[in-house]
Amino acid sequence: MAATRTRRRATGRPPRLLIAAGAVTAVVALIPLVYLLVRVSEAGLQRIIEVLVRPRTLETIGTSVSLVLVVVTACLAIGIPTAWLVARSTLPLRGMWLVLVALPLAIPSYVAAYAWLAQFPSMHGFWAAALILTLVSSPYVVLPVTAAFRSSDPALEEVARSLGRGPVRAFATTTLPQAWPAAAGGALLVALYVLSDFGAVALLRVDAFTRVIYASYRASFDRVSAAVLALVLVGLAALLVYAERRVRGRTRRWRVATGTQRAAIPVTLGAGARLGALAWLTGLTILALGVPLVSLVLRMLEGSRTPLDPLELLTAALTSLGVALAGAVLAVLLALPVGILAARYRTRSVRAIETVSYTGHALPAVVVGLSLVFLTLAVFPAAYQTIFILAFAYAVLFLPKAIGATRSATASVSPVLEQTARTLGRGPLRAWAETTFRLTLPGIAAGGLLVLLTAMKELPATLMLRPTGLDTLATELWSRTEIAAYGSAAPYAIALVVLAAGPAWLLSRAMTRADTDTSADTVAP
């Protein structure tokens, strides 16, 4: 009865201040959409219908949706078994393998595509793009599912085994359902990443939404057609958020029993299974890390006619890190109210705020960049081409990563703790800060690291919004690639991968530390 009453209070009417803060975040995320609506309103209904029913538009929709389905399915097929191996088995050097499977997050899609093309020049088309996008985005599933497997209560699986179920069936009916919210959240990030990717599909000549929209802006300057296509992207993003929320379900999964949760006993792998697991992880590492890194090193060793300027390289690296860090901090601040609302409440207003907050990631970065150019020139001329507006663009683009991490971390903490603090005289904010915030800080920080990692790799919006004379590793790399100076571009690509490897390593270390803490907390009966 007490648990039932607690759940009702946790899912009742959300505080007005939290709703107001979440509404601010939703408004911020809506800025690119407002720009699109302004552009589309200039055309008229007849022109919009003409754009939507064109054969090329229908082909673009089919290509983009198919690419999302293929990549998401592949990432789940790769991510869930990989997460189980590093979280719940006796695989040797599990911590090392977790680092290796997380490091592909440090490789931008356009760098991976460029590296593969350098070794396999004939590699183009849909399946090539699906392969590249799967390799660079599979950690979005591996990392949260690993955390879910490690934090799941082993007692449920043990009870299922005691009732006569085999190990596979017991796992599938107890532990796997506990990990589905994490898997669904990771799949959502993968889907949004694929929809908004520009570099890989452009280099591999796949007519997905982003490439067609960019071509409309740059070649024909048909901003109406591009805006209509971008609005279709918003609709697809909303459908993805709705589908993920349905998979996640209405249930909350936290542990309310007394005592300290035991760590799950790792499943012992036989000699054959261990060999197969090592072969699986080695092959995945070679494809996701080995081929791109070897290709980049070979390109750099080939040299170039332009000598490398170490100071220029260092300046670009520091600029990339500084601007991305500013965007990550802003994204976390904006994500806090939305993540808390989505984890604790199920009202229509909360669902609307959460859905709207995801639209920025689904829009192509070129559209977000153009919308902020339009806004700054029309309303805030002093902000045009400033570091602040570039960091603001990063926050809008990658806000879903911070929201997803905040929501997952908050949902894993029982609201009873916060309510108990309230009964002891704490105010709402202090009660949250002393209980829920402390427990969710690692998850929130992980979301910030994801934003930092992705912002350092962002290209189209950076090209459009950066201050004059300010260059990041991504812009330096792209400018050299455009003129086929592959040798001089290689050091910037390698520096970008090395710099982005830091946040990826920290994410994997956080997972490893969580595993260690769980083991340390185990008590003997």
Image: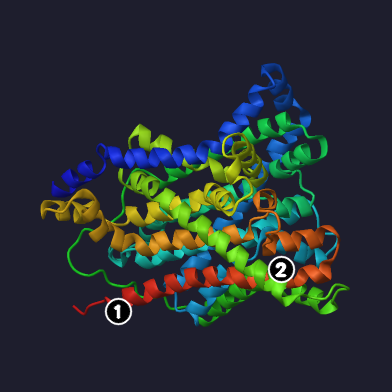
Earlier in the chain: of badge 1 and badge 2, it is: 2
- Secondary structure beneath disc 2? helix
Residue ID at (22%, 70%):
260
Q: Please give the residue where the numbered disc 2 appears in the rendered image.
A: 493
Residue ID at (24%, 51%):
429
- Secondary structure beneath disc 1? helix
Q: Is residue 241 left or right of residue 443?
A: right
Residue found at the very far front of the displayed protein: 382
Q: At label 2, which amino acid type do we have? A: Ala
Q: Is residue 38 above or below residue 185?
A: above
Q: Is residue 190 visible?
A: yes
For the image, the number of numbered tags is 2
Quarter of the image for the C terminus: give it.
bottom left
Q: Which is more toward the observer, 77 or 407?
A: 407
Q: Is residue 339 above or below residue 41?
A: below
Q: CA distance from mark 1 to mark 2?
A: 40 Å
- CB under 8 Å between discs 1 and 2: no
Q: Is residue 104 visible?
A: no
Residue 96 lies, in percent from the top left, at 52, 79
Which dot marks residue 520? 1
Residue 432 lies, in percent from the top left, at 25, 54
Residue 231 occupies quadrant: top right
Q: At label 1, which amino acid type do we have? A: Ala
Q: Is residue 183 left or right of residue 479?
A: left
Residue 204 lies, in percent from the top left, at 78, 53
Q: Which is more toward the observer, 47 or 280?
A: 47
